[in-house]
Amino acid sequence: MAFIYDYGLFAAKSITFVVVVALGLITIISAIARQKANKGELQLTDLSADYKHNKQHLTESLLTKEQRKVFLKQQKKEAKAQKKQDAEITKPRLFLIDFKGGMDAKEVSSLREEISAVISMAKSDDEVLVRVESGGGVVHGYGLGASQLQRLRDKGLFLTVSIDKVAASGGYMMACVAQKIIAAPFAIVGSIGVVVQMPYFNRLLKKHDVDIELHTAGQFKRTLTIFGENDDKAREKFKAELETVHQQFKQFVSEHRPRMDIDQIATGEHWLAAEAKKLGLVDELKTSDDYLLSQFENKQVIKVAYHNKKGLADRFSNAASLAVENAIYRVIETCKIPF
């Protein structure tokens, strides 16, 4: 029995040692992988070529064997003529960028890379289509996102923003930078307002005899706090700061959409795109798919996407984060009015 006990103790120590070493190696490898993951890559996809290929494939599948022979012969002749034409005449390009933003607007880091790439190769007659999907988030993040889109206009490029689902609050701040805004009829648009919501634990802490000390240098270094005691003076200052942000938001939208009655639409409300068009928030009711189909004949459509390479640790982290987000989203959806 003593031998079995000693052997079990030795095995436990060995396993513990192996686990500790393994965890250390995993930490080092994850750190190295994370450094490499920071080096993303730019991906360009010729959507015009994909569209042409799919159209040809569908046409062929609907033809008889004899019709297919005639069609393919005709296609070879047209391809030869098109190649000669392409050598003589260069089509203007339409660069497509997708932006799907979360609350923290971290996706702006990829957007800046995509826009920098477009600026480096676009010509004056090219156009940029950005498909925006966001319900808004942090002011500084979406302010930077709007500034990134402004770079395109500053370079003399025509910018179109498409809203297929939602562009509200910070999402609309980005959208309004465009010379033209198109939206699907039932897309959600607007919410030109500012909101902050926070829990307040001070009474709970007092109930359990927990004191919180907060020391600041500067009268308004901290206004409202979730743990300490808040007074009316702090609340008034906080509301004044929110109002300042709202006024700047309104001014920003007015500068880019001067024909709108800003006081009418800057109430924090949102509308379906069909109603938003009447108010001037949207220029045309159309999905991004319809818009792209109308451009394929006259422009070369290129999708620009910047992808961050993710290591194993990042994949697990993102999967867990996505699971939590989906759970929260399902709870929110169950509370909405059915439509």
Image (tube, rainbow, N blue to C red):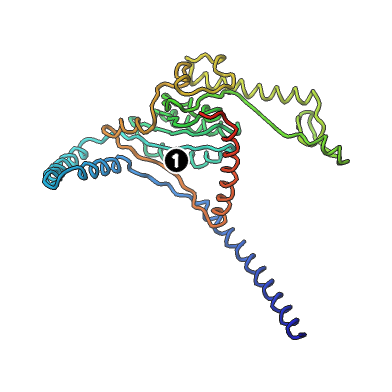
Residue sticking out furthest to the right: 209
Residue 331 falls in image quadrant: top right
The spot of residue 29 in percent (x, y) is 57, 62
* Placement of 273 over or under 85, stated as above or below: above
Residue at screen point 44% across, 34% down? 131
Q: Which of 321 and 58 is in front in this view?
A: 58
The spot of residue 71 in percent (x, y) is 14, 43
Residue at screen point 43% across, 25% down? 185
* Placement of 111 over or under 28, stated as above or below: above
User: Which residue bears the numbered disc 1?
Assistant: 114
Which quadrant does the N terminus fall into? bottom right
Residue at screen point 58% across, 59% down? 30
Residue 192 falls in image quadrant: top right
Number of marks present in the image shown:
1
The spot of residue 138 in percent (x, y) is 60, 33
Q: Which of 149 and 195 is in front in this view?
A: 195
The spot of residue 277 in percent (x, y) is 45, 19
Q: Which of 4 and 319 is in front in this view?
A: 4
Kind of residue at disc 1:
Glu
Residue 294 falls in image quadrant: top left
Secondary element type, mark 1: helix
Residue at screen point 57% across, 14% down? 263
* Placement of 272 over or under 326, stated as above or below: above
